[in-house]
Image (tube, helix red, strand yellow):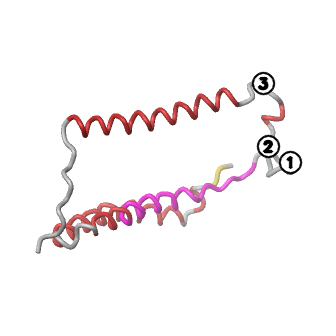
Amino acid sequence: MPGPAMPPIPSGSSAFLAFVVALLVGVGIGVIGYVLGKLMAPTRELPKKKLRYECGNPPKGRARGIFTMQYYPYLIVFLTVEPVAIYGFLVALAAHTRTAAVAGILGAMILMLIPPLIFGLRLAGRIELWSVE
């Protein structure tokens, strides 16, 4: 028994129009946010703007110090693992009809994402790379 019929994939001018509308909406929202930020932000230069901010408390001690940036490798790991999870769920929707093709696609994706995952995990353990003085 064949599965449910898939809706037709938009093609030609309707697909292009959908892409252009989505692109314009995305860029438009970004431009509106930028313009509103420029209009609403105070424009005067005050000395207080250049001071440190310590969660509402008066600043204490040195103004500059060691700042550890060790979360970047974990960001690399997250950006590697997240697409596998998302595409895994999306591709699993078609797994009941095309099992071999789905397994091949997921296998290829995982093989392509293993090097950045290993890279991120190795760098996460090296704290000397992530401190800024």
Q: How many residues crowd around disc 3 within 10 Å: few (fewer than 14), some, or many (20 or more)?
A: few
Residue at image position (57%, 35%) is: 33
Figure check: 126 above or below 44: below
Magenta span has 104?
no
Drawn side of residue 70 relative to residue 53, left or right: left
Secondary structure mostly seen in magenta is helix
Instruction: Please name whichever residue, 120 or 98, is drawn nearer the observer in this view of the structure.
Output: 98
Q: Inspect the image, locate mark 1, and give the three-letter code of the amino acid beneath it.
A: Pro
Q: Residue furthest top?
A: 44
Task: Kindly report the distance in space between the C-alpha atoms of the residues bearing marks 2 and 3.
Answer: 18 Å
The structure residue drawn at horizontal position 55% and vertical position 31%, both measured from the top left corner, is 32
| Labelled disc at residue 52 | 2
Residue depicted at 47% across the width and 58% down the height: 76
Which label belongs to residue 59?
Answer: 1
Mark 1 neighbour density, 10 Å: few (under 14) some (14–19) many (20 or more) = few
Mark 1 falls on what kind of element?
A: loop
Viewport quadrant of the N terminus:
bottom left
- Residues at circles 1 and 2 in contact by the CB criterion of under 8 Å: yes
Q: Position of residue 118 (x, y in %)?
A: 41, 65
Q: Nearer the viewer, mark 2 or mark 3?
A: 3
Residue 75 lies in magenta, yes or no? yes
Label 1, label 3: how far apart the Cα atoms are: 22 Å
For the record, the magenta segment spans: 65-85
Q: Which residue is mark 3?
A: 44
User: Mark 1 vs mark 2: which is more N-terminal?
Assistant: 2
Identity of the residue drawn at 22% across and 34% down? 13
Q: Is residue 59 left or right of residue 107?
A: right
